[in-house]
Image (tube, rainbow, N blue to C red):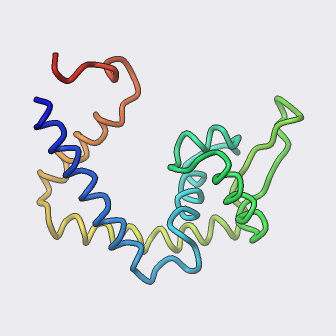
Amino acid sequence: MTTTANDAWEALLSAHAALIKRFAAEDIWQGLSMREYDVLYTLSKCPHPQRIGELHRHVLLSQPALSRLVDRLVERGLLCRHTDPADRRGVRLSLTAAGRDLQRQVGRRHARSVARALSGELDAGELRRLETICRKLAHDGPGTDKDPSS
């Protein structure tokens, strides 16, 4: 079971790396890095402004790197900071109108690119199974600390 699990992990990482490299090479980002887009996309899904710690749970960056990236996005007018009404010392982040517009423009192109890449290799049933498997692996509830050898 250990070999199978590690082979699956290696295949997952290889697929992720190949797709990210492919997507990063596309001319769709309008001056954004993929990490900057990830922050804009994550905030676009949030109904309310988010604290940086909340945002940090959803992006693959260290807290210091995320803070620097947020500073750059604020300077570019894509994000704004709000005083947290529940804790006046805290700050919440949200998209500006320009940030929301840019996220939508890039997002439409990226969604088409993802659809082309995945549907070019997988049929509809495989895509549904892939989604189910990935959602199961991403689940942070009971059972995430199970020993795969048991």
111 lies above or below 67: below
118 lies above or below 48: below
Residue 139, image x and y in percent?
36, 31
The residue positioned farthest toward the bottom in the image shown: 27
The C terminus, quarter of image:
top left
The N terminus, quarter of image:
top left
Q: Which residue is located at x 47 percent, y 68 percent? A: 107
Q: Which residue is located at x 80 percent, y 42 percent? A: 91
Q: Locate residue 90: give its quadrant.
A: top right
Is residue 35 rendered to the left or right of residue 142? right
Q: Which residue is located at x 60 percent, y 52 percent? A: 43
Residue 86, image x and y in percent?
82, 29
Is residue 50 rendered to the left or right of residue 36? right
Please tell me which residue lies in front, 143 or 129: 143
58 lies above or below 78: above
54 lies above or below 26: above
Is residue 93 rendered to the left or right of residue 14? right
Is residue 134 rendered to the left or right of residue 69? left
Residue 113, image x and y in percent?
33, 72
Q: Locate residue 76: give its quadrant.
A: bottom right
Number of residue marks: 0
Please tell me which residue lies in front, 56 or 64: 64
Residue 65, image x and y in percent?
64, 54
Please tell me which residue lies in front, 30 or 99: 30
The residue positioned farthest toward the right in the image shown: 88
